[in-house]
Amino acid sequence: MLAGIRTIDLRKVFTSPPPLASGGGGFAPTFGRGKTKKQSKPEIVALDGLSLQILPGEIFGLLGPNGAGKSTTVGILTTRVRPTSGQAWIGEHDVWMEQVVVKRLIGVVQQRPNLDFALTAREILLFHGAYFGIDAQQRSQRADALLDRFQLRDRADQLVRGFSGGMMQRLSIARAMMHDPQVLFLDEPSAGLDPQTKLLLWEIIREYNQSGKTVLITTHNMEEADALCQRLAIIDHGRNIALGTPHELKAAVPGGFLLRLRFGHLSPDLLQRLQKLPGVTEVRATDDNSADVYADRGGSLVAEVASLAALANAELCDVHISEPSLENLFLHHTGRSLRE
Amino acid sequence: MNWKTFLALLGRDAHVARRNLIPLLLQTFLQPMMFVFIFGRVMVSSGYMPVAYKSLLLPGIMAISMVFTGVWAVAMPLIGEFQFTREIEDRLLAPIQISWLAIEKVIFGAIQALFAGLVVIPAAWLLLRPGVDLNLRSPLTFACVTVLVALFSACGGLALGCSIDQNHIGLMFSMVLTPMIFFGCTYYPWSALAHFPILQKIVLVNPLVYASEGLRGTLVPQFPHIPVIAVLVALTFFDLLFLATGLAQFRRKAVS
């Protein structure tokens, strides 16, 4: 049975800080409006009307900076966070109303490894299988296959307390796959992994997806989103600000290239002149001395910008050229970098 | 209700307990046995305590062991697993309603408490004999009291474990368990408080009073004790109260 994911107008307001690893991790507090009474609890709006439709068999990415609401979305979709309003479904099942059915359909890798420290790596997989009612023989076969696949066989019978961060992350992913879920949630799966392990992980995710499974990844790493996801939603402050394939999203950046310029002094006249340069689609002043220029070319524009600056007596101090990327798209929509 | 999942959750806890068996046994029995030895043997042999005190002491020690074991078995893992590492997440995502995970913890804690209580009887008897005069008139009533005490300790562990965080474990012992034990009629019968009428009324809010008095009333009924029927009613009340509180706290901790 193939299962997609759907949310309608999801909203989550926290009145106390969410536990870091439970799906509300990485918070940038956005305080709710209209609360003036001193004694009232501070409200943190984590999701502000998020609607998504993720197709069965798709690798879908939620891209956004820390505190955008990615982990809260995963928390709600995996029964771990109660939505303030709105609805979410896995397949045909309402996540909040049919929690047990939904839990059978999903596998979850949370942002921080939350392995059972009282058990060895193999026991973690075996007990996880037992929770899902898998019989003993099949459990053992699957655990061995996953330990091999994730290159954990030599440490399989050791307690996980002494594992490195990367090993814990690999084991968390193996555990999430143990009961062969229809929908796999990976919250920042490659955070803290070395490049080699990251590639192994990507390969495993693609393989898993090829068997018809739906994968939802959250990331603030554009490279990962670009390499892995068939479609992406870019979210910020709990809202969906752009949706499409990585290619479509990159094409949506005006001009494609972004030149971040810093001058000794920036005048409105210079901004107008920059706007008129051939190939420039949009110019935005970001502060008194800086401007972002979106254009269909990169390096070849620098000489022209420098001469314009010289003419306007505004020395060009710094230039940064970005090729068409999701980072640029995010900047275009929010005026902030994904890494901020 | 999904029995396979429930049994697997129990299996996991049993596996972890088996791995930690020696420290678990020491933690459960060392302190009560030392207490039994000093108060029941040394103090009695030296004439500071009457011989009858041996029989009076045994049910109290049994109650302390059970409560301490049940609270510890449920509260300590929960406090740890709900902390920063959120080790409990895997089990919260198991295909079963999350309240059943809390109930599983209670059942496992109650089994450990029962075991602790039932081992104390022969162990203390061996340490104290001769002079221990046990009068088990109604095994069924004794079984009911013991099970209710075990459940009260495990439910109390659930409520405590989900209400305090790691930084306050010391306070849990000094502010909750220690006063409970000293004012729990464990080392003396409730009737001994007759000279302190106000205190005698106040201690009735302490569930350990009913545990000690219930075990006294069924194991050594020759001593004065609170009527067993009152004990059964009070213990059932505390079991339900702590279970309801514990489940509510557990759900509040488990879901953001």
Image: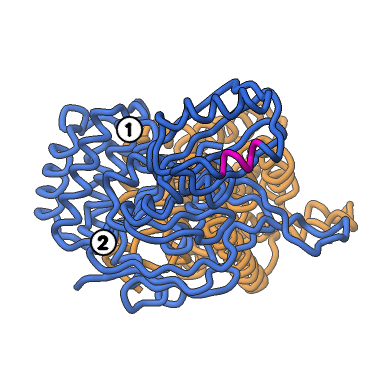
Chain colours: A blue, B orange
Residue drawn at 48 percent across, 50 percent down = B117
Q: Is label 1 or label 2 in front? A: 2
Other-residue count near label 1 (Cα within 10 Å), few / some / many at <14 / 14–19 / ≥20 = many
Can you tell which quarter of the image residue B167 is in? top right
Of all residues shown, which one is farthest toward the front?
Answer: A311
A88 over A73 or under it: above or below: below
B188 over B140 or under it: above or below: above
Q: Position of residue A320 (x, y in %)?
A: 49, 28
Residue drawn at 51 percent across, 37 percent down = A339
Residue drawn at 17 percent across, 32 percent down = A151
Q: Position of residue B94 (x, y in %)?
A: 35, 60
Q: Amino acid type of disc 1?
A: Val
A120 over A13 or under it: above or below: above
B207 over B161 or under it: above or below: below
Q: Is residue B61 visible?
A: no
Q: Amino acid type of disc 2?
A: Glu
Residue occupied by mark 2: A58
Q: Which residues are magenta?
A: A270-275
Q: Are marks 1 and 2 on the same chain?
A: yes
Q: Is residue A197 left or right of residue B160?
A: left
Q: Is residue A170 visible?
A: yes
Q: Chain of mark 1?
A: A
**Separation of residues labelled 1 and 2 (CA atoms):** 32 Å
Q: Is residue A273 magenta?
A: yes
Of B129 and A34, which appears nearest the observer?
A34
Q: Position of residue B24 (x, y in %)?
A: 43, 36
Residue occupied by mark 1: A160
